[in-house]
Amino acid sequence: MYDLAGKRVYVAGHRGMVGSALIRRLSNENCEVVTVSRTDLDLLDQAAVRAWFIREKPDAVFLAAAKVGGILANDTYPADFLYDNLMIEANVIEASHRAGVGKLMFLGSSCIYPKFASQPIMENSLLSGALEPTNEWYAIAKIAGIKLAQAYRRQHGHDYISAMPTNLYGPGDNYDLRGSHVLPALIRKAHEAKLAGRSGIEIWGTGTPRREFLHVDDLADACVFLMQCYSEDEHVNVGSGEDVTILELAEMVMNVVGLDGAVSCDRSKPDGTPRKLMDAGKLRALGWAPRIDLRDGVARAYSDFLEMGETARGMAVA
């Protein structure tokens, strides 16, 4: 058991969706949460990161900082997704080693798994097949992060662990259609269609791929749980254990937003991985389960979307 009470806990990426959720969750743990803005510390700058760690001396680290985006962003900026994520994780993990950090959690992504992995995907499916080409750059960087955590554990005896979340959504999500993931993109599309008086929305691909979703506050709770209770070499899947088709998801979003009409499919666009459902049995066996079901979570996400306002999203909200 790793007790967070009284510890200085650094959340890397605290302004992002995952980092913000971790900040909210850690407020219940009687620990000192340490953050630093991007303007004051560039995580791509190795020397600056090392100096900051030596000066601030965090006891524990949640490594949630990353360059993230959907299929379009990954496909358009492969060099940025590979280089930036490699540098962020390498700099933070090495600096943690040098500064004597007691425990570190690296946060990855379900895209680390092969495109045609057996479903539901178990942790040992890693590196068992080819990746999905549309996001392989990001996936390769995240796989490297897992291996870094394992390598520092094996060589230096550090208590570094990794958690692999499924598709996330919730407060602080990115609703920019040029770089957002599927669920926030659907929320924005449905809302804009409703404002414009249109019926229905268009989605990429056939609508048949199946995806699993987890509310980011459930993820944060799982991360704190694992930080306290887990200390092994293998990464841990964090998911809801249930999946839906993209078409079913689009229809659910339209229902929440209050938009009538049908969903049309742009079959000229890629589907991505046919199915991606993670096996969360390992985490369940440790004693953790999610609390927020998808329909309720989508409703919460839409409320957050409305609260963000025009400036945050670059669009008008009625």
Image: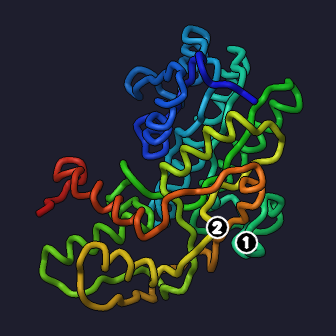
Question: Badge 2 local density, few (<14 within 10 Å), some, or many (20+)?
Answer: some
List x then y, in percent, for residue 3: 67, 25
Q: Is residue 289 above or below residue 156?
A: below
- At a point 78% along the width and 75% down the height, the residue shown is 118
Identify which residue, 128 or 298, lies in the foreground.
298
Q: Quadrant of the N terminus?
A: top right
Q: Is residue 78 visible?
A: yes
The amino acid type, in three-letter code, at marker 1 is: Pro
State which mark lies toward you, 1 or 2: 2
Above or below, 175 against 145 in this view is below
Q: Amino acid at mark 2?
A: Gly
**Pick the front one: 190 or 134:** 190
Q: Residue 78: x percent and y percent? A: 54, 56
Of the 4 image quadrants, the one containing the C terminus is bottom left
Q: Nearer the viewer, residue 218 or 192?
A: 218
Question: Which numbered marker is on residue 120?
Answer: 1
Badge 1 element? loop
Where residue 263 sits, quadrant-wise, is bottom left
Image coordinates of residue 306 in percent, x first then y, are 22, 57
Residue drawn at x 40%, y 37% is 15
Check disc 2 and report its element: helix, strand or loop: loop
User: Left or right: 30 with respect to 266?
Assistant: right
Image disc number at residue 241: 2
Query: Which residue is more in the foreground, 28 or 244?
Result: 28
Instruction: Choose top left, top right, bottom left or bottom right for residue 96.
Output: top right
Q: Is residue 148 visible?
A: no
Residue drawn at x 66%, y 39% is: 106
Q: Are dots 1 and 2 in contact, CB under 8 Å?
A: yes
